[in-house]
Amino acid sequence: MKDADRTPPDPGYLGGPVPRSAWVIAAICILTECVLAGADIGLWGKPWWRLTTYQYAGFWPGLLGDWRPNYAGQRWAMFASYGFLHAGLWHLAVNMTTLFLLAGPVAARIGAQGFLRAYAVSLLGGAVGFAGLITAPTPMVGASGALFGLAGALLALEFDRRVARALPVRNVLAMVFGLAAGNAILAWTSGGALAWQAHLGGFVAGWLYATAVAPRRAG
């Protein structure tokens, strides 16, 4: 008996050229982290550059309460700026590798502009998820919320494609479960250092964005 679940995914799901906007995002993240890493070890600047950068551009939940911002508009700017900072070169390397793995497939499915919109929506969603679910005034940096949003968008597009063609969706649901389980394990083993709230918020935002875009693409 033929197993319908063996039907190959849409070619766009497998890959495509990395859009220019992804290269720009990566360049900003890499340049920022390299400057801070160099300052950390005394190659240039001052060791306090990283802490100061985090204070001005990281995501601080307390600013949504009664904390005093460092500059006008910080409460709103941090919903985007946090995603261009990282907690070290290893954190940066993992996130940028993931960005390049996901950017091409997402752009192949919804276009370069669609990729950029999905990234922006997911970046915002990650911040909203973190702000809404965090229980302590812990700061956050990193692009992983937006990256989980790209993964959510890609899985949502494949889910919608399979539903439209009456194909099984269990493989897609298994991937969603795997991401959730992996996050739960990492959050537990990291002692709370993993911003799973941002991952969840970004994933949901990316999924919803792709679901809204898919009918227009089909039309």
Image (spheres, grey):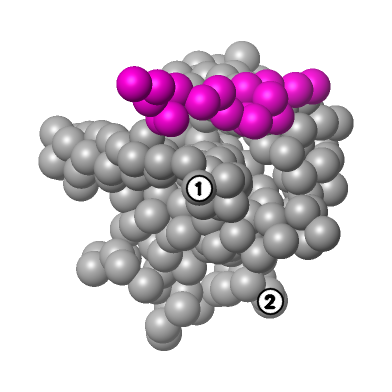
Placement of 147 over or under 46, stated as above or below: below
Residue 21 percent location from the top left of the image:
81, 37
Query: Which residues are drawn in magenta?
Result: 1-17
Label drawn at residue 190 = none
Placement of 191 over or under 88, stated as above or below: below
- Quadrant where the image shows the N terminus: top left
Label 1 sits on a secondary structure element that is loop
In front of the other: label 1 or label 2?
1
Label 2 sits on a secondary structure element that is loop
| Residue drawn at x 66%, y 65% as measured from the top left | 212
Is residue 31 in view from this perspective? Answer: no
Residue 213 is a magenta residue: no
In this rendered view, identify the residue nearer to me: 173 or 193: 173
In this rendered view, identify the residue nearer to me: 176 or 199: 176
Binning the other alpha carbons within 10 Å of mark 2 as few (below 14), some (14 to 19) or many (20 upward) gives few
Q: Amino acid at mark 2?
A: Ala
Is residue 12 in view from this perspective? Answer: yes
Q: Which residue was labeled with disc 1?
A: 166
Of the numbered discs 1 and 2, the one sitting upstream in the chain is: 2
Residue at the extreme bottom of the image, as rendered: 66
Q: Which residue was labeled with disc 2?
A: 72
Q: Quadrant of residue 123?
A: bottom right
Direction from residue 109 to residue 133 in the image, left or right:
left
Residue 167 percent location from the top left of the image:
48, 41
Residue 215 percent location from the top left of the image:
71, 61
In this rendered view, identify the residue nearer to me: 57 or 40: 57
